C-alpha cells in the first residue's frame, strides 16, 4: 500500500480525541436521527463494502462511506469528525489491510460492532505476476504480500456477502428474514457474473494481460489467466527498469495486445509502456470507487464492462 500519504497512527489517535470532543455536543441528536427512522447506521470503508451493505441491507440500513467517490482508497485521510463518528455507528464494514488509516481509526475509536471482510474469506499472497503455471511469482526487488482485492473475484465476493448477511442478521434480528433474502439474491447475481466470466474467458488467443495496478490476481487465478502488473498491489509504486524490460519480452512472447490502466490513478506509466511496446491501452477498473467516468453505475455493471474489455484484449473466440 502507498502509506506515504496516509496519516500516521499518532495523528489518528489525536483525531479520535478531537473528533469525539467535537461530536459530544451533538452525538445525542445524531444518534436520535439514526435511530429515528428505525434504520441501522452502517459505515462502510470504501465502495465494495458500501455495495454489499446497500444490497443486503436495502431499506433497513442507512449507509455512509468513509471513501468518497473519486478518492483513491489506499490514500484515504480521515477528518477528526469522521474518525470520531465511528463510535456512533451501529455497524462498521471494512477490509483490514487495504486502508491503514481506517484500520487505525477503528481500533482507536473503540467501536464495538465491526466486521472485517478479510475474515469472511481467505486471502492469498500475490506479487506483480499472478496466474499461469506457477503461483504468486516474485520478481527482483518485489515481494509477494497479502492481497486484499478479494472483491474482484465474484466467488470470493459472494463468500464475503454471505458473511455480511449473517452478521447483519445477528445485529438486527428483527429484519433477519429480509437480510437473508437479500443476501441470497445478491449471491445469485454474483453466481451469474462468475458464469459469464468463466464462459467468456474460456477460449482466448492469449491468457496474459498487463495492468498498472496488480489488483486482479484473484480474478486471474479464478479464470485461468496471467496478470502481469507493471508494479505490485500498490497502485502508485514505480516499476523498476528491469520490470519494464521484462514486460517488453512478455508482451512479445505471450502476444499481449493491451496495457490496462484504472480510473482513480494516473495512466502515465501505462501509456509509456504501451508506447514502447506498440500496444493499445484500455481501462480495467479495480472497482475501488464509482465516479462519473466509471463504465457502469454499480459493481455488477462495471464488472461486466471489465469482462468485455478482457475479452477484447485477450482475443476471446
Image (cartoon, helix red, strand yellow):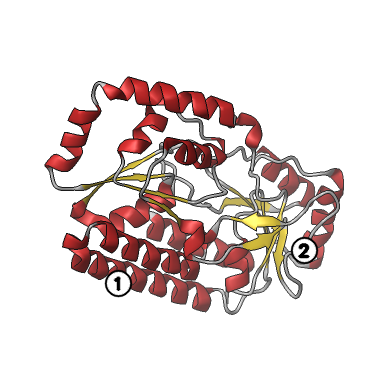
**Residue 227 appears in which quarter of the rendering?**
bottom right
Q: Is residue 79 visible?
A: no
**Residue 84 appears in which quarter of the rendering?**
top left
* Near-viewer residue (283 or 82): 82
On screen, residue 20 above or below 312:
above
Q: Residue at x 52, y 43 (%)?
A: 263
Q: Quadrant of the C terminus?
A: bottom right
- Residue 244, position as x, y percentages in the image: 81, 48
Q: Residue at x 81, y 66 (%)?
A: 253
The residue at which mark 2 appears reads as 137
SS at mark 2 in the image: loop
Q: Quadrant of the N terminus?
A: top right
Tell me: 70 left or right of 122. Answer: left
On screen, residue 19 above or below 49:
above
Tell me: 123 left or right of 197. Answer: right
* Near-viewer residue (242 or 120): 120
- Residue 203, position as x, y percentages in the image: 60, 79
Number of numbered discs on residues: 2
Tell me: 32 left or right of 66. Answer: left
On screen, residue 186 above or below 232:
below
Q: Is residue 201 visible?
A: yes
- Residue 168, position as x, y percentages in the image: 29, 59
| Cβ–Cβ under 8 Å for marks 2 and 1 | no
How many neighbours does mark 1 have within 10 angstroms: few (below 14), some (14-19), or many (20 or more)? Answer: some
Which comes before the other along the chain, label 2 or label 1? 2
Q: Residue at x 21, y 62 (%)?
A: 173
How many neighbours does mark 2 have within 10 angstroms: few (below 14), some (14-19), or many (20 or more)? Answer: some
The Cα–Cα distance between marks 2 and 1, rounded to whole angstroms, is 36 Å
SS at mark 1 in the image: helix
Q: Residue at x 75, y 51 (%)?
A: 278
The residue at which mark 1 appears reads as 184
- Residue 187, position as x, y percentages in the image: 36, 70
Amino acid at each position: 500500500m502507498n502509506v506515504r500519504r496516509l496519516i500516521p497512527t499518532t495523528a489518528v489517535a489525536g483525531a479520535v480525541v478531537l473528533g469525539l470532543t467535537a461530536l459530544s455536543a451533538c452525538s445525542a441528536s445524531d444518534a436520535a436521527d439514526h435511530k429515528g427512522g428505525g434504520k441501522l447506521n452502517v459505515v462502510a470503508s470504501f465502495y465494495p463494502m458500501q455495495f454489499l451493505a446497500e444490497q443486503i441491507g436495502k431499506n433497513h440500513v442507512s449507509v455512509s462511506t468513509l471513501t468518497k467517490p473519486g478518492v483513491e482508497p489506499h490514500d484515504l485521510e480521515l477528518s477528526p469528525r469522521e474518525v470520531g463518528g465511528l463510535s456512533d455507528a451501529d455497524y462498521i464494514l471494512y477490509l483490514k489491510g487495504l486502508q491503514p488509516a481506517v484500520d487505525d481509526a477503528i481500533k482507536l475509536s473503540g467501536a464495538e460492532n465491526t466486521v472485517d471482510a478479510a475474515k469472511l474469506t481467505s486471502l492469498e499472497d500475490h506479487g506483480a505476476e499472478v496466474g499461469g503455471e506457477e503461483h504468486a511469482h516474485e520478481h527482483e526487488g518485489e515481494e509477494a504480500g497479502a492481497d486484499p482485492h478479494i472483491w474482484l473475484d465474484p466467488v470470493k465476493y459472494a463468500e464475503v456477502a454471505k458473511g455480511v448477511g449473517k452478521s447483519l442478521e445477528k445485529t438486527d434480528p428483527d429484519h433477519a428474514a429480509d437480510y437473508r433474502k437479500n443476501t441470497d439474491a445478491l449471491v445469485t447475481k454474483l453466481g451469474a457474473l462468475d458464469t459469464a466470466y468463466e464462459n467468456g474467458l474460456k477460449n482466448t488467443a492469449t491468457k496474459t494481460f498487463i495492468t498498472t495496478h496488480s489488483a486482479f490476481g484473484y480474478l486471474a487465478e479464478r479464470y485461468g489467466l496471467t496478470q502481469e502488473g507493471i508494479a505490485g498491489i500498490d497502485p502508485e509504486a514505480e516499476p523498476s527498469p528491469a520490470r519494464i524490460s521484462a514486460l517488453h519480452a512478455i508482451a512479445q512472447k505471450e502476444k499481449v495486445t493491451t496495457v490496462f490502466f484504472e480510473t482513480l490513478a494516473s495512466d502515465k506509466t501505462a501509456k509509456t509502456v504501451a508506447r514502447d511496446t506498440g500496444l493499445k491501452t484500455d481501462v480495467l477498473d479495480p472497482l475501488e470507487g464509482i465516479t462519473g467516468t466509471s463504465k457502469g453505475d454499480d459493481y455488477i455493471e462495471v464488472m461486466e464492462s471489465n469482462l468485455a474489455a478482457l475479452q477484447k484484449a485477450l482475443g476471446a473466440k
